[in-house]
Amino acid sequence: MSLATCCVIFCRRIGTATNPQKSDLSWKDIRNIIKFTGPLILGSSLFITYEVLALKKSVTLDTQVVEKEKLKSYIYLDAVSFDKRENQGITYLARKELHKALRKVLTASAKLFRNPFDDHFSTVDLEDHEYGLWLLLKKSKSDDKVVRLQAVKEMAANHYWHDYQYRTIAQACDVRTVIGLARSKETDPRFFLPPPHLPEVKEDYSIEEELRQLLASLPQTEIDHCIQYFTSLALRESSQSLAAQKGGLWCFGGNGLPYAESFGEVPSATVEIFCLEALLKHSEIATHCDKIEANGGLQLLQRIYQLHNDCPKIQRSIVRIIGNMALHEHLHSAIVHSGWVSILAEAAKSPQVIQSSYAARTLANLDRETVQEKYQDGVYVLYPQYRTSQPIEADVLFIHGLMGAAFKTWRQQDCDNLEIGKALDEECYTQCWPKTWLAKDCPALRIISVEYDTNLSDWRTKCPVERKSIAYRSHELLEKLRAAGVGDRPIIWVSHSMGDSPALKELHDEFLTFAKDKNFQVLNFVETLPTSIGSMIKLHVVPVESADLGIGDLIPVAVNHLNICKPKKKDTFLYQRTLQFIRETLAKDLGN
């Protein structure tokens, strides 16, 4: 090794030929060191030192960059001049040759990680504690799906990084990765960038006016006529002056949308709820979702969401709209970049089962890496709501009855002396026992609860333009379940109080014929106590003779009609017998 080469290598640590001012030593000092040390020993020791240091810092950030990053949420890169005249000379040439040799070493070492380092990682400097972060980022963008999923899993498991490291991931990861993090359990919220700042609004800004303009921009074709009618009727009844001003009902969609100049007689939140309900129906149509996004709907809905932290009903309606838009993959990037993932990730951890399930449905529709199914409005996965390595063997579907709902029907039996604070503690009380109890006892099940309209008036011809019969609702629900992949695995149906009518009697008879032909296993609980309706009336809603299907086991239980589907405790007979039936039935079907 020549003396000149040795000097250049040493200068790699203390200065450069083009910028000696950065060195702590002068060239005179260097010559003295060489003079007293000797070229051969100097060359050998310095080359080994350089190689070790280069290997250690092959993938590291500049120290100044790290310090700045700890204070700011930006990624800094040292600028490199592309003017070759600034990079010539013996220093540049020597460093170039060394980097070529060292890159071969790095590439060979990188085979331990399955893929070689790319150009970015071979030229960036990192400290020891930064290796994992950048390697995980690289793996998260791999062409190999298995590698990507493992990288996201390892990211989500990190709870010891510094703030700036989480922010680095948040800014550097792609859409696919941030969605995966949001669907990973116990993910640190610092992985998600806060929503972008919305534009400042003027003093005379009106949310209602913005909603009206958004609705007016949407096509009128294919819209649910009944929702137009009922929303218009509700607005007219809330404000006599509204109908008087325009001489008719509020109608949604189309050009030239008639509307009232002021909503002074209607509470602001009420008007927003009416408008959001209409927007929700629009979001069920793919082309209308495109219009909502193009006309700034994602930002408007986010503003309304933030303004109504004290109104869960409004926030739930908005998340349902975003969930419908998430059914369309080409809108995923817009949803993520508008800041919705951080909002949804937070909502998914809500102790309120409705909020968390609505958010989980939206995130599942965004996650095309691990979820093939699509969950339309009204189909909610209670378990698993996060990514899991647990194989799913069967589906359990919970179908509520008349006047019921996807969550409240399946809550634990209410206790009179239950404190409000304990109502949110799943150890003391569960808002949805299939989600809390059954999921722990049967982790190989996908548990789905279905929501659909069951108001008694909806079973009649109340809407003058459209009738939603049992057949209509059944077909609608069937299509939603097919989209969710129901039917691909064994199914267990759990239902409550489907009412009594000639049409239902006919369905009942058809079910019995089908069940007997297919040798279905059936378990039926029947109430033995009357149900209080008001303070004066007690009614035995479903007597034993009506509950007897003529197939399977019929078990009387000392509860009323409302509590026949609400176990008092996890160790009560009602839940334990249900759990036993599910396990035994699946064991026979799955053969284990």
Image (cartoon, rainbow, N blue to C red):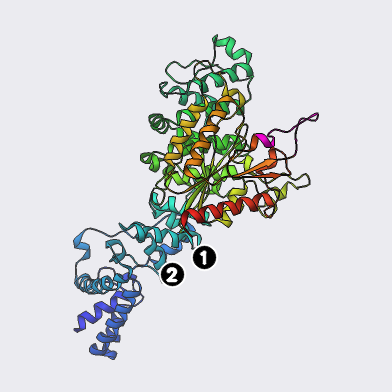
Quarter-of-image position of residue 5: bottom left
Callout 2 touching callout 1 (CB < 8 Å): no
- The one nearer the camera, 318 or 521, is 521
Is label 2 in a helix, a strand or a loop? helix
Examine the structure image and report whether residue 309 is included in the region drawn in magenta.
no
Which stretch is magenta?
Answer: 529-545
Mark nearer the N terminus (2 vs 1): 2
Q: Quadrant of residue 330?
A: top left
Residue 574 coordinates in the image, percent (x, y):
67, 49
Residue drawn where x is 23% and y is 58% of the image: 82
Which residue is drawn at the image coordinates 39% and 68% (left, top)?
Answer: 131
Query: What residue is at 63 percent from the left and 25 percent from the top?
Result: 267
* Residue under numbered circle 1: 160
Instruction: Name the element at disc 1.
Output: loop
Task: Please name the amino acid that badge 2 sits on.
Answer: His
Could you tell me if residue 144 is visible in this image? yes
Q: For this view, does 313 lie left or right of residue 418?
A: left
- Would residue 343 be seen by someone viewing this image from the given angle? no
